[in-house]
Image: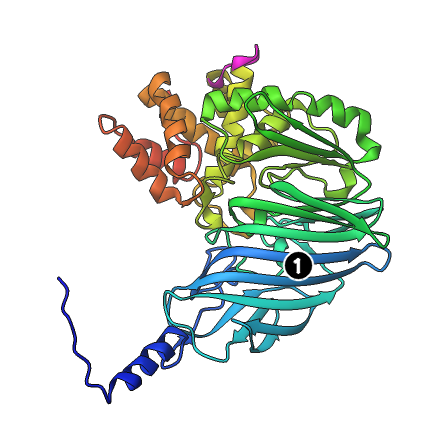
Amino acid sequence: MSRSVRLVPALAPLLTLALALTACGGGVHGTPGSSGVRDPYFPKLGNGGYDVTHYDLTLAYDPDRHHLTGTAVITARATQDLSAFDLDLEGLDVSDVMVEGRTARWNRAGQELTVRPARDLAKGATFSTTVRYSGTPETITDPDGSKEGWLRTEDGALALGEPAGSMAWFPGNHHPSDKAAYDLAITVPKGLEAISNGELTHQSTGGGRTTYTWHTAEPMASYLAVLAIGPYQVTSSTLKTGLHVYTAVDPDQAEAGRTALAKLPEVLDWEQRKFGPYPFSSAGAIVNRPHDSGYALETQTRPVFPGAPDTLTMVHELAHEWYGDSVTPKSWRDMWLNEGFATYAEWLWEEDHGGDTAQQTFDALYKGDYYDDPDQSKAVWAFPPAKPPNAEQISANPVYARGAMVLHKIRQTIGDRAFFAFIQAWAADHRHGNADTADFTAYVEKKEPGHDFSEIWRDWLYGDGRPAHE
């Protein structure tokens, strides 16, 4: 229903002014957004009061000086009336901050960059924040002792983000629950490559420097952003399906890396048959020297490998493109939804390629025969996959192996045909979104209402110790 309103002429200009002020934030009395989204393991990560939709990053890196210069333009939507909001940024020196083209006040406290716009922002308003910064980017040590953030290499740098490292090289809302599109332009000395996520849309050289521009259209959690700088051997190709594949191999890994990556199209084809259509516009891989990171990581569209990967490692990391990158956890408590699926992908590959069946792998894990080390066999039962005890354990063995066992128990319960239809539907229905364990269990029960999953949830997903099993 609509109603017409007749304005008193003398009041019309005043009402017009009031509406204009409201539209631009005038007359809004906001409150500060929270610093952190209270993640159970990383409570200071992310920030409340807004949702980022796009990052536009313009960077320049000098490897000799180990110096990074950046301008980040962050487009977001206010989810409340905002008088101030926080961005996550570890280290680096901020020179100025602007909100909607106006100079904003700001201050630093640890990883929190608190921004106070000149005018309060109205709930629902879209606004842009520009942050100019520079300095020596930091390497961050995870609770489990691994290194992330900005990793300096012998001939460049490698930026990795899981779980908190991306805040070492650009400001943002660094929690997996806030995904956004990205444009990234990176300028480096001529002769070096700079590889990131998505599509390479432009490359130009001048004055001894080369600029590479990358575009990621699909939503991406910041921990999945990657930037690799060095004298990589780069290959660009297009698969029969039209999917663009972009790979980069460190010269020290040239022969082994190329041999390993030759299997990438086969793995992608198999995974699309198992998991459904590939969820992004490009694929690929980055192969570094083993000591550059020491671990593989499922960075979106372009996983990173520490040396030439074996086939199962490639299967695992590429499976994350569906489970983890497209369907991203709402919090770091939900890591098993990433790692359980990717580990089960390894079991399925073995099953389809002359190795042990998934049932045989499950049985070996349950009996303690899967690992040569008895302590590693016991570690499977250290805690339930949906309840890691602390941040140090979110990537521990139960999250991977026992997470995969949960999936196999579902398969045993509903049968192969329904199970493989289910894992495709889960990826399709949550494509480019976020989900947590409660979403998963509810989804299973809705899809398969004729089965009782209470024992699986109670004993295998949330229960302590090794469950009873016939």
Left or right: 396, with 122 as reference point: right
Is residue 15 placed above or below 315 in the rendered structure? Answer: below
Dot 1 falls on a residue whose secondary structure is: helix
**Residue lying furthest top in this view?**
354
How busy is the neighbourhood of tag 1: few (under 14 within 10 Å), some, or many (20 plus)?
A: many
Where are the magenta residues, as a range?
352-358
Mark 1 — residue? 168
Tell me the amino acid under the disc marked 1: Ala
What x and y, as percent, mark residue 85?
A: 49, 71
Which secondary structure dominates the residues rendered in magenta?
loop
Nearer-the-camera pick, 87 or 190: 190
Q: Residue drawn at (13%, 62%), measured in percent from left and top?
A: 1
What x and y, as percent, mark residue 362?
A: 48, 22
**Residue lying furthest bottom in this view?**
10
Is residue 460 placed above or below 470 in the rendered structure? Answer: below
> Which quadrant of the rendered structure holds the C terminus?
top left
Q: Residue drawn at (50%, 30%), measured in percent from left and top?
A: 278
